[in-house]
Image (cartoon, rainbow, N blue to C red):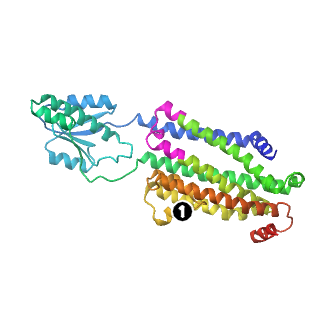
Amino acid sequence: MVARREIRESARSRSFAVTTLLLVLAVAVGVVLPAALAGSTRPLLVGVVGGRYPASAVLAQAGRLTGTPLTPVEEPDLARARSELDQDRVSLVFVPGKEVLLPRLPDPGATPSSAAVLARAIAQLDGERALLSNVPPQVAAALERGAALPVRGLRPQQRTTSLKARVTGFVTAVLIYALLLSYGMRLTNSAHEEKSSRVVEVLLATLRPSQLLLGKVLGTGLLFGGQLAAMVAVAFAAGLASGSAAVQGAAPAVIAVAAICLLVGYAFYCTTFAAAGAMVNRQADLFNVTLPIQIPLFVGYIVADAASFSSVGALGRVLAFLPPTAPVVDPALYAAGELPLWQFALSVALCVAGVVAVARLATVVYASSVLHTGPRLRLRSALGRGTR
């Protein structure tokens, strides 16, 4: 009954409809934008060093197969070509019949760049061409090791994660922070309004305080889950329709992790915010009573910001396992490659344990505060009254 009432009142409000529409549009634009910008990509510069035969045919075929625009740049010698590659003046170096050079080999776990895909296509095509020009027994030896030329990195290989996965992690962390804070304050205001209008006295005539709190949390949570499902569905639909890189590679896994964090985060914070709203009698006190709840969310946002574009220290890794901060921190750390899947599973398990503990305490506070009048009830007093 309480859950239906929450859903009915919130779903009918214009603010909920506008917020849902804006969130869905923001997700769609964020997914489609990378694909729209990709159309103006500049051609890759490919340094070409001599060779036994012209390289233009191989480069043209490799460009067609990979869909990568490229521009050949004639290099006087290999030393000059390596220098140009080291200074990022060319994207790769092609030595016909010998090798293909990249600045650094891509991480096997990351989505390869356009230059890496093009380099492998060139290596394969030119290797096949070199193989066909050989005569036995060299042909047999070449077939043993494969036709492709070796692809070597100019600098040592370094484990990295793709930029789009990091950006996806950061964006989802910001979205989680904003949604948890928004829905948390919605529950706080709802609990306070019911108390100040004395509607809660009518409801408690037939319901226990724990049932009322659970109904409010469940009803708002169903709306919350509906918005989340709509955003995820629009993200994948828009990404598949536009061919956006935002839903390719590691991005879908990051989105899945973020969705789990969002649900766990709501379960952790929902009862806390609702209990906070029941503790006060004046609208002016809502900010003060919810500030201690908002601080862990803000700390998690700061760590997620740092983790998305640089490495975090031991403190950031610890915060990934603490229930108040983990829902915001985990997506960014996972996207950055600093939170393996087994550690994320452990973090979720700890968050679930935290949800159970916090829900019990919040229920006690809500039950002892919702009918209290007069000065604002302190947390210690609320807990003390609930245990009597």
Is 131 left or right of 328, judged from the image as shown? left
Residue 387: quarter of image: bottom right
Nearer to us in this view, 154 or 71: 154
Is 66 left or right of 214, judged from the image as shown? left
Residue 210: quarter of image: bottom right
Q: Is residue 240 magenta?
A: yes
Quadrant assignment for the C terminus: bottom right
User: Which region of the structure is painted magenta?
Assistant: 237-256
Q: Is residue 21 visible?
A: yes
Residue at the image position 29 percent from the left and 37 percent from the top: 118
Q: Residues within 10 Å of mark 1 (few under 14, many from 20)?
A: many
Quadrant assignment for the N terminus: top right
Nearer to us in this view, 216 or 96: 216
- Position of residue 371 measured from the top left corner of the image (x, y, whole percent): 86, 61
Q: Is residue 205 magenta?
A: no
Residue at the image position 83 percent from the left and 68 percent from the top: 375
- Position of residue 291 measured from the top left corner of the image (x, y, whole percent): 67, 63
- Position of residue 186 measured from the top left corner of the image (x, y, whole percent): 72, 51
Under mark 1, the amino acid is Leu
Q: Main secondary structure of the magenta part?
A: helix
Residue hosting label 1: 319
Residue at the image position 33 percent from the left and 32 percent from the top: 66
Q: Is residue 243 above or below residue 264?
A: above
- Position of residue 339 measured from the top left corner of the image (x, y, whole percent): 47, 55
Secondary element at image label 1: helix
Q: Is residue 284 visible?
A: no
Q: Is residue 132 above or below residue 254?
A: above
